[in-house]
Image: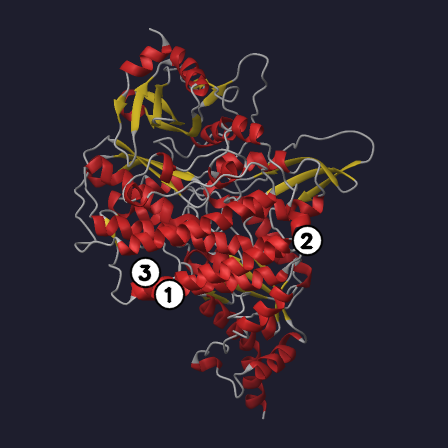
Amino acid sequence: MKVRDFLKHQRFPLPANLPASRVCADRRQWLPLAATLHESGARLLTLWGTDDRDRDGRFRMYAAYLAPEGVLVVEHALEVTEATAFPAYPSLAAIFPAAQRMQRAVYDLLGIVAEEDPGNEADTRGWLRHGGWPETFYPLRRDADGSRQYSNFSAPYPFVTVEGGGVHEIAVGPVHAGTIEPGHFRFSVVGEKMLRLEARLGYTHKGVAKLFEAMPQSSGHRLAARISGDTAVAFSWAYCAALESITGTICPARATRQRALALEHERLANHLGDLGALGNDAGFAFGLTHFSRLKEDLLRSNSVAFGARYLLDSIVPGGVAADLPAEAPPLLLDLYSDLERSVTKLRSIYDEHAGLQDRFRGTGQLQPSLAEKLGALGLVARASGMACDLRVDHPWPPYDRVAAKCFVQSTGDVAARVQIRFDEVYESLRLCRALLQDLPAGPFHAPVPNAAPYQLGLGVIESWRGPVLIALETGPDGCIRRCHAHDPSWQNWPLIEYAVIGDIAADFPLINKSFNLSYSGQDG
Amino acid sequence: MWNTLSRMWKTGLLTEPLPVLEPAFETPSPDLDGLQSDLLAVVGRALCIRHVDAGSCNGCELEIQALHNPYYNLEGAGIHFVASPRHADLLLVTGPVSVNMEEALRRTYDAIPGPKLVIAVGDCGACGGIFGSSYASRGAVANILPVNATVAGCPPTPTAILRAILQAVRAPLAEVQRNRVIST
């Protein structure tokens, strides 16, 4: 059967908040399927593995693709191997470069190997395992005890070196100069010019996937919210959407509107914070002062509307934790007007500031062709010419009612990522107003029954950073069997390494901030 | 330039008073001057803080960053975040200590000249939080370093973090005063 026919006839619907399907592939079909999907314009969304040896003696690999018609999950049961050998599957990295780090992470967690074609050398350096647990311990295997502690042996990590006259290395991190997350950056520079950057991440790996396995389905949203605190609403919504899709729960209309309101507030808070920080990183402290003030106003109004400044516990399975109080809508509408007025003034100050624009323009350029080839996601992709926003492409309730707009820039530099943030701030304010006006009466929560065991469901939500995904597999007695969380930072971290080439080392903080990727979301 | 100046003028000063401390840490002059003279008595200069994310979800970082906004105006109070542990008096640690960050955290602590203070910020830092101890996490900061104070919350508010900082700094001062009372 030809691959396209196979895809047409063998796919089954998958419970999710947007169009999703699932297809089972054997070892021979795994790569041709990926190649066909790549040709049809699909991007790799995520990769994960599971240990099903307790059920049928197999390990499984899953690849989720973002195709024009929705999300397609390809499932591959690995062939049973001799007890001594590692189970293996063909590597996707030659077709989807973004798969590389994910495959290294899958090995660290499960001990299953991505086999490269002969001629392609496999990168066998640990990604999540830095030497804090033994090489023979694979935490996501069913027989691994996740609560056991091991002593730490710092393992060597050979970076790729650049040779030649005058080249030297700058090693930065994991502890950075500012209040940011930990990661290691190795720059090869000549003079001030960056020739190469290699990032090493995984420092904040907290064993989230293993923790999920010990949790009841009814409380997984709390852990999901803490995968990346700045994306708490998106992750907890994705988790709830996955669980609700599996159980067939219909979230009440009033609750979905409030969820979207929370998601847009999260987008606003992050964009306002980033716009200020970007000004500051280019030497314009005024920007930080004024944008951080606006962000604080928003967070304080969150306390009134949602009961907390950061909404880590406001989205729960079946709806939202608390109804929007009656005094919130007028207060929020006033806030939106003030934000819109202030941001308009600040935008014209940013646009007209020659020194600022000089630092923004042409810096950290990610060419659209490269973004496309490497599978960029979210805000970073939109700043490099890719029109992709799940709220627009596959609107799930309530975005099917409020019609979000997608903003695109084509230059792919820091300036483009600044402009996208400005545009999205206005759009989020418009959406917030529309959501408040359209807020129907009724319950804000629906009961969620226990899910049948061994069901797979997806929740995919467009966070401020890009699409986040939760793949939830239920276990017996209301437990979680496996929960895989994916942050778009996985795709976008390697892109920074290209965006900085040729810029000066002093511009790295500015470029890094313009991407603003999650370390914790990536490390898991 | 005109737009920038006019924006500053129209926004005005937004800085709020320092948070009220717990009774044990009450001081005769809780205002800014009082704080600054206390800081001088304890650290002999502006207070310098080094922050380390030891594995947090980045929620606590957002609230620490908020301390710099004009409402809390941390720098205006004479409290300064520094880039090097060698310049610091106080270490602010967020997150459960991930196994992969354990060594970096210890090394940062060792690089701070004594006497030094450590504050664990957030539920994770205080008690391990939702992540607890596992193959990948050592749990609370106190499992790795001596901790002077903890701030509960997920994430704690900027006010709670600021209050903990002010109290931790005044704790040695209270000790000095107590000793003085005893010796007289």
Among the 4 quarters of the image, the one containing residue A384 = top right
Which structural element holds mark 1?
Answer: helix
Which structural element holds mark 3?
Answer: helix
Which of the chains bears the disc numbered 3? A
> Depth check: A36 or B152 in front?
A36
**Residue mark closest to the camera, 1 vs 3:** 1
Disc nearer the start of the sequence (1/2): 1
> Depth check: A102 or B177 in front?
A102
Picture coordinates of residue A354, whole percent (x, y):
68, 53
**Amino acid type, mark 2:** Ala
Residue drawn at (45%, 81%) of the image: B24
**Amino acid type, mark 3:** Phe
The circle on residue A354 is 2
Which of the chains bears the disc numbered 1? A
A314 left or right of A48?
left
* Visible residue check, residue B131: no
Q: Mark 3 points at which residue?
A: A306
Disc nearer the start of the sequence (2/3): 3
Q: Do the residues labelled 1 and 3 touch (CB within 8 Å)?
A: no
Q: Mark 1 points at which residue?
A: A334
Q: Measure the alpha-carbon separation of dots 1 and 3.
A: 16 Å
